[in-house]
Amino acid sequence: MTRYVVIGAGIVGLATAHRLTLDHPDASVTVIDKEDRVAAHQTGHNSGVIHAGVYYKPGSLKARLCAAGRASMIDFCAAHGIAHEVCGKLIVAADESEVPRLHALHERAVANGLPARLITAAEAKEHEPELRCVEALRVESTGIVDFTAVCTTLADLAEKGGATLRLGTAVTGIDRRRGEQIVHTKTGDVTADVVINCAGLHADRVARLAGVEPPARIVPFRGEYFELTPERRDLVRGLIYPVPDPQFPFLGVHLTRMIDGTVHAGPNAVLALAREGYRWSKVNPRDIADFASYSGLWRLARKHYRYGLTEVRRSLSRRLFAQSLARLVPAVTEADLLPAGAGVRAQAIARDGALVDDFLIVARDRQVHVLNAPSPAATSSLEIAKHIVAQLPG
């Protein structure tokens, strides 16, 4: 009987555990997470969008797993009674200077086989009457869901399939002994034949504990959200996104009607002062020292410091945040915004300062390390799990 240990009870870790119970029903599967609940970090703080896969390089792992993952996620939600909706979205060019990028995005969407079409400003207003744009890209296959609810279901299915969840259990080390792997935790050791690292914000650190030097380092970027006041939710019917800057993995602040009917605005992207830094006041000296000593971050900062300063200013000013939203929906004002929490993105940065754009999964000696799985990882999670499990040693 093969013993699998999955580190991390976010959506990728839980999907992997569930897939293991399906494909290897006689195996022992243990999920370990330092938090006392599932989906405590990236999964539980995202915008709840089931992405279509517009943005990703054709043929990349992201593009392939997102397209398949969107279909798998919708089928999974339908099968298990999880509220979801395929509502489509608009990506809009707010002025003429953005039109070439919008057309390039349309070409990428077509190359990825997606149902996306360019529409006029008048056609866009049929979908979103309060919208202002010169042209838009309509993507029909985008959806919304509560990914925490997905995780709760995955955890339940994994346990029914024989998996053990050890929550509130922090990993402190990983050793190899006579062909076995000993995962040390604060609540005792767990012996494994195969270790799968899905630790998200701490994935690179877990890899080092296992004796693997990752090719990139995790740097935390906080994305802050507002939501529209209840009486102003009618300004937005669905999902409204700006044309993204292709130099960055961040999509820019956008407006998203959530599955519960609220309308979230954001996120921005600022360097967090802790890997779990959901607010400016959360400061972790170890985390700061970790990224401050990393040459890759400094190379990135030198290239894009103006962009970073703009994001910081918007973080500190609700007025500037509202102005960014008003480029898309002019009726949005500062008074319409309520604070709605934040998420932290585990962004892998290479030593040369390049942002790791694709999913990064490294396999070594009966270990698999998921070292970069930001958006659209939640959308793609069921297919990421299949991809991981298919290449595991028995």
Image (cartoon, rainbow, N blue to C red):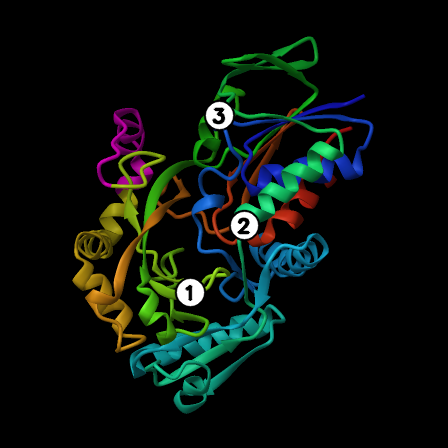
Reading the image, the residue beneath label 2 is 147
In the image, residue 9 sits, relative to residue 94, either above or below, namely above
- x and y, in percent, of residue 223 in the image: 33, 50
- x and y, in percent, of residue 245 in the image: 35, 64
Residue drawn where x is 51% and y is 50% of the image: 358
The mark found on residue 256 in the picture is 1
Q: Is mark 2 on a helix, strand or loop?
A: helix
Q: Residue furthest front?
A: 231
* Quarter of the image that includes the C terminus: top right
The amino acid marked with disc number 1 is Thr
The amino acid marked with disc number 2 is Phe
Residue 97 forms part of the magenta stretch: no
Q: Which of marks 3 and 2 is nearer the N terminus?
A: 3
Q: How far apart are marks 3 and 2 (CA)?
A: 19 Å
The magenta stretch spans which residues? Answer: 280-298
Residue drawn where x is 49% and y is 64% of the image: 55
Compared across the picture, whether 22 is left or right of 116 comes to right
- x and y, in percent, of residue 154 in the image: 65, 42
Residue drawn where x is 44% and y is 31% of the image: 202
Q: Residues within 10 Å of mark 2 (few under 14, many from 20)?
A: many
In the image, residue 386 sits, relative to residue 230, either above or below, namely above
> Based on the displayed image, in which of its 4 quarters is residue 180 positioned?
top right
Q: How far apart are marks 1 and 3 (CA)?
A: 31 Å
- x and y, in percent, of residue 123 in the image: 45, 89
Q: Distance between the residues labelled 2 and 1?
A: 15 Å
Can I make out residue 161 in this image?
Answer: yes
Magenta span main SS:
helix
Reading the image, the residue beneath label 3 is 34
The amino acid marked with disc number 3 is Lys
In the image, residue 130 sits, relative to residue 27, either above or below, namely below
The mark found on residue 37 in the picture is none
